[in-house]
């Protein structure tokens, strides 16, 4: 498993950029305040792919821990959900 606090933010950012580029979005960088749907123009299919890719890379699933997409608006929200899940998983 990843060293959550150090690696998760960059893993999430990398996957967001990769999926955006694969979809032909002109995204060159991302920041915690970027919204997935407005700023980054992610469709629901792109978000689903992102969640699957992150689950595979991190072995974490915040959506099984009680988070929903309604809780996630920005890239920072997504990172925070993964960090909280990693913290809970480590404590268990």
Image: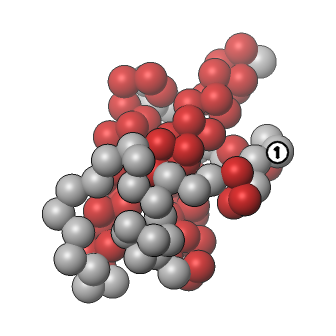
Q: Quadrant of the C terminus?
A: top right
Q: Is residue 12 above or below residue 39?
A: above
Is residue 12 shown to the viewer in this render?
no
Residue 83 seen from this side: yes
The residue lying furthest to the right in this view is 66
Image location (x, y in percent) of residue 16: 37, 61
| Residue occupying the far left of the picture | 28
Q: Say what secondary structure mark 1 lies in.
A: loop
Which residue lies most toward the bottom here?
A: 24
Q: Quadrant of residue 32?
A: top left
Q: How is the structure coloured here?
A: secondary structure
User: Along the line of sight, which residue is nearer the eye, 75 or 82?
Assistant: 75
Is 5 placed left or right of 72 in the picture?
left
Tell me: 10 left or right of 75: left
The residue sitting at 57% across, 56% down in the picture is: 73
Q: Position of residue 42 (x, y in %)?
A: 46, 75
Question: Which sits in the foreground, 68 or 1?
Answer: 68
Residue located at (32% from left, 47% from top): 31
Q: Which residue occupies 41% across, 76% down? A: 41
Residue tagged 1:
66
Viewer-closest of 57 and 7: 7
**14 with respect to 66 (left or right):** left
Q: Is residue 49 above or below residue 60?
A: below
Q: Is residue 89 above or below residue 77?
A: above
């Amino acid at each position: 498993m990843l060293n959550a606090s150090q690696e998760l933010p960059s893993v999430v950012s990398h996957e967001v950029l990769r999926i955006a580029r694969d979809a032909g979005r002109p995204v060159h960088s991302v920041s915690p305040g970027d919204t997935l749907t407005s700023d980054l123009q992610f469709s629901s299919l792109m978000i689903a792919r992102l969640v699957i890719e992150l689950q595979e890379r991190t072995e974490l699933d915040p959506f099984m821990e009680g988070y929903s997409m309604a809780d996630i608006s920005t890239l920072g929200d997504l990172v925070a959900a993964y960090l909280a899940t990693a913290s809970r998983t480590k404590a268990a």
